[in-house]
Amino acid sequence: MTADTRNETAPVLVWFRRDLRLSDHAALTAACATGRPVIAVFIHDDAVAGLGAAPRFRLDLGLRALDAALREKGSRLILRRGGAQEVLRQLIVETGARSVYWTRLYDPASQARDSALKSALKQEGIEARSFAGHLLFEPWTVQTGTGGPYRVFSPMWRAVAGRAVDGLLPPPDRIAAPADWPGSEPLDDWQLQRGMRLGARVVAAHVQAGEAAALDRLDDFCASAMARYKAKRDLPGVDGTSRLSDYLSLGEISPHRCWAAALRAGEAGAAGAETFRKELVWREFAYHLMYHTPHILTENWRSEWQGFRWNTDGGTAPVTAWKQGRTGVPLVDAAMREMYVTGRMHNRARMIAASYLTKHLLTDWRIGRDWFEQHLTDWDPASNAMGWQWVAGCGPDASPYFRIFNPETQQQKFDPDGGYLRQWIAEGHRDPTPTALSYFDAVPESWALSPEMPYPQPVVGLREGRERALDAYHDWRG
């Protein structure tokens, strides 16, 4: 057999990462188009090992759903643990594969890993191709009129609102299988759910993983909530958001499909369609900033904020109360408890909880960033970092530091009937809701909390906290 003949029949490895779907998957589509066998691979590397407990738990569910979807197409998901280069080289030896395809990622660690991998594979005569798919627009394709990335959201939105987006790709009818499958590690051996402990059972009741569930959720949102999205998206006590964030984070649905659905809804007269598209571009904005200014993940994006004197001790009594959802400020506590029970937190509530930590408690946004990374099933590196910096005042397009959310007035405006508070706070209520009681099942036993405990007094008065934050800001500004 000649080298050319061998290459015509050699399998293609498709390395899945944050693209756990079969449709709108350019790498998978291209691999199937070769007519050669396709081997889907997921690698438990340092990137997976570094995930927080809730994202690992959610990944476990996503991988199970992806494997089931692949099996319906005559394929399966091969699981391996180790460094990406070592694992893929070993699979190339085992299978005779001559090509490796994957969907691009944009965080600095993935960029460095993928660039080194592509170079090494090409030097060894292996075809290595990366494809778009995690974003609507590749970060290097969106520039200001003078060149360079956008650093303010509104002009970026205006620049891309009418731009063409890649078309949707159907899932393959069948995926050609190799003559012999390489070995795969049992997913249970990875113990991705272990970090959640008892909370896994609670959160699992609020998660439906996989591409099929994502598509159903998008259909439901378009049919029932898209039209009122602009009016209802800030009300945490109602079902007014898309709830697609965990699907987008793991790539169980593509942003292209969400964009196309919003365009159709807008053409049909849905009032919230443009607002939803803006939220998709806000996600893009976070990714473009991460790509062009990667220090946003770890450092104050605005360099002048390096000298601001945050509290950097995550173990103080007030910060611990914030982490536990026991600050004595009902809207802040409800937000944190929603996260422990469902793995998600309403966006309005996120802003209020983040503002309380960074301003009323004068605590470094990175402490909040790390806590959310542990507990959000929809954790996303770019959106999490930018969101925290936006609220804290040190990030791009930021809310000014002196704009301090008042949880009481926010509750009066966005939860006037107290429905969100009743949903998540049990103490002091004669007949607490099941979701409020679930919080006590989800949190660590070491916290020794029960619904019979009295609701706590505020760890800091709202006026006192606001004045202290403003004093710190003015002292810093001189």
Image: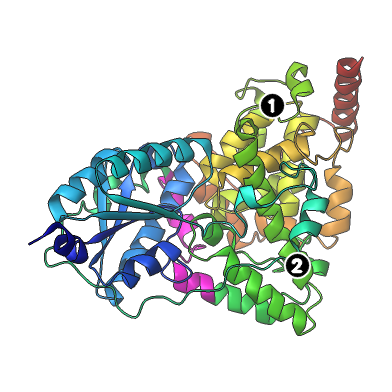
Direction bottom: furthest residue: 268
Q: Position of residue 181 (x, y in %)?
A: 15, 62
What mark, if any, has residue 364 been given in the picture?
Answer: 1
Q: Amino acid at mark 2?
A: Gly
Q: Which residue appears at 80% of the width and 31% of the height?
A: 360
- Asked if the magenta segment contains residue 191, the reply would be no
Residue nearest the observer in this picture, 112 or 427: 112
Q: CA distance from mark 2 to mark 1?
A: 38 Å
Is label 1 in a helix, a strand or a loop?
A: loop
Is residue 455 placed above or below 367 in the rendered structure? below
Is residue 454 placed above or below 283 in the rendered structure? above
N-terminal label among 2 and 1: 2
Q: Position of residue 464 (x, y in %)?
A: 88, 28
Is label 2 in a helix, a strand or a loop?
A: loop
Residue nearest the observer in this picture, 310 or 254: 254
Q: Is 155 positioned to the left or the right of 283 in the image?
A: right
* Residue that numbered label 2 is attached to: 162
Is residue 439 placed above or below 108 in the rendered structure? below
